[in-house]
Image (cartoon, rainbow, N blue to C red):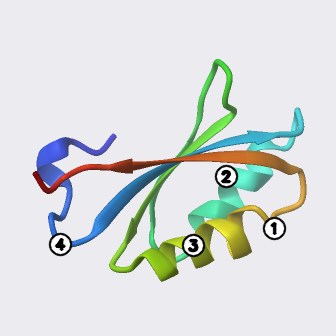
């Protein structure tokens, strides 16, 4: 897993928590890992099924990755996005 010290302070790092149809997790993780900008993608337990860590230089690129790539994957039901504050 990424450590805070490993995060590039010049890019936005974002956690995308994903809900999907049961049994589709492995296929979705494989597809998400192919997306440029995805640094980590793992299965989770609890209210979310998958967690993806994304790094992006712009908000527009981040929006493109989440809205037009991750959310378009078959069997993805919903996403919740958290931006990691690395600049204080």
Q: Give the SS element for disc 2.
A: helix
Q: Is residue 30 left or right of residue 63?
A: right
Q: Residue at x 17, y 53 (%)?
A: 6
- Residue 12, given in percent of the width and then of the height, sits at 31, 65
The residue to which callout 1 is attached is 72
Using the numbered discs, state the Cα–Cα distance from disc 4 to disc 3 in whole angstroms: 17 Å
The answer to which of 42 and 69 lies nearer the viewer is 69
Identify the residue shown where x is 89% and y is 39%. 21
For label 2, the residue is 29
Q: CA distance from mark 2 to mark 3?
A: 19 Å
Q: Is residue 55 above or below residue 25?
A: below
Cα separation between marks 3 and 1: 12 Å
Q: Which residue is identified by label 4? A: 10
Whichever of callouts 2 and 4 sits on the residue coming sooner in the sequence is: 4
Q: Residues within 10 Å of mark 4 (few under 14, many from 20)?
A: few
Badge 1: residue crowd in 10 Å (few <14, some 14–19, many ≥20) = few
For this orientation, the residue located farthest to the front is 88
């Amino acid at each position: 897993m990424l450590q805070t010290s490993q995060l590039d302070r010049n890019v936005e790092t974002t956690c995308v928590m994903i809900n999907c149809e049961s049994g589709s997790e492995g296929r979705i993780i494989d597809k998400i890992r192919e997306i440029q900008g995805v640094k980590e993608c793992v299965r989770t337990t609890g209210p979310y099924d998958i967690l993806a860590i994304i790094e992006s230089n712009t908000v527009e690129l981040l929006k493109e990755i989440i809205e037009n790539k991750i959310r378009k994957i078959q069997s993805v039901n919903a996403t919740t996005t958290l931006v990691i504050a690395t600049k204080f």
